[in-house]
Image (cartoon, grey):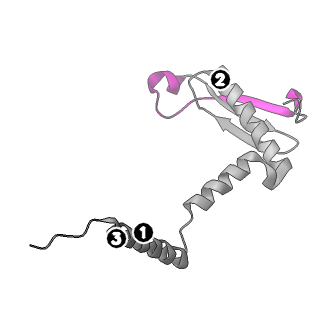
Amino acid sequence: MATLGIIDEELTEKFILGSGSGGQKINKTHSCVYLKHHPTGIEIKCQSSRSRELNRYHARRELCDELEERRLGRESKRRQQIEKIRRQKRRRSRRSKQKSVEDKRLLSRKKQLRKPPAREE
């Protein structure tokens, strides 16, 4: 946080009632952390574990990641990972699919030629 210039006085921190799975313990304790960074207006809500202290840590780390992403833009590691996954999940073009099928057929023919000739009786 110090390298990004985040000061604790710029943050508003609240502990809110948890929700979701986890049973009675999570539903009656204020373990969900809400952070707001006033200069940028970024709001983070974190309830990744049952522990309040662990949630505080995760919320601050998430805030730092968000600030870094905004400052670096496309160069940030997180943004690059998201783009890489998006490219991997993107559907292939028709031409790419046709080329792939042609390559498979060619490989199949090669394998057919490797087989020993059938004996005639």
Is residue 62 located in the magenta-colored stretch of the structure? Answer: no
What residue is drawn where x is 58% and y is 59%?
88
Q: CA distance from mark 3 to mark 2?
A: 62 Å
Q: Position of residue 39 (x, y in %)?
A: 88, 42
Q: Quadrant of residue 10?
A: top right
Q: Secondary structure at mark 3?
A: helix
Mark 3 or mark 2, earlier in chain: 2
Q: CA distance from mark 1 to mark 2?
A: 54 Å
Q: Secondary structure at mark 2?
A: helix
Name the residue type under label 3. Leu
Q: Quadrant of residue 60?
A: top right
Q: Is residue 40 above or below residue 22?
A: below
Mark 1 or mark 3, earlier in chain: 1
What residue is drawn where x is 53% and y is 23%?
28
Q: Position of residue 80 (x, y in %)?
A: 72, 52
Q: Secondary structure at mark 1?
A: helix
Q: Is residue 26 left or right of residue 78?
A: left
Q: Which residue is mark 3?
A: 113
In this picture, which residue range is highlighted in magenta? Answer: 7-28
Q: Is residue 81 above or below residue 89?
A: above
- Quadrant in the picture for the N terminus: top right
Name the residue type under label 1. Leu
Q: Is residue 40 above or below residue 15?
A: below
94 or 33, which lies in front? 94
Q: Which residue is mark 2?
A: 54
Q: Is residue 119 left or right of residue 89?
A: left
The label shown at residue 107 is: 1
Closer to viewer: mark 3 or mark 2: 3
Q: Quadrant of residue 65?
A: top right
Mark 1 or mark 2, earlier in chain: 2
44 or 74, which lies in front? 74
Q: Position of residue 11 (x, y in %)?
A: 82, 32
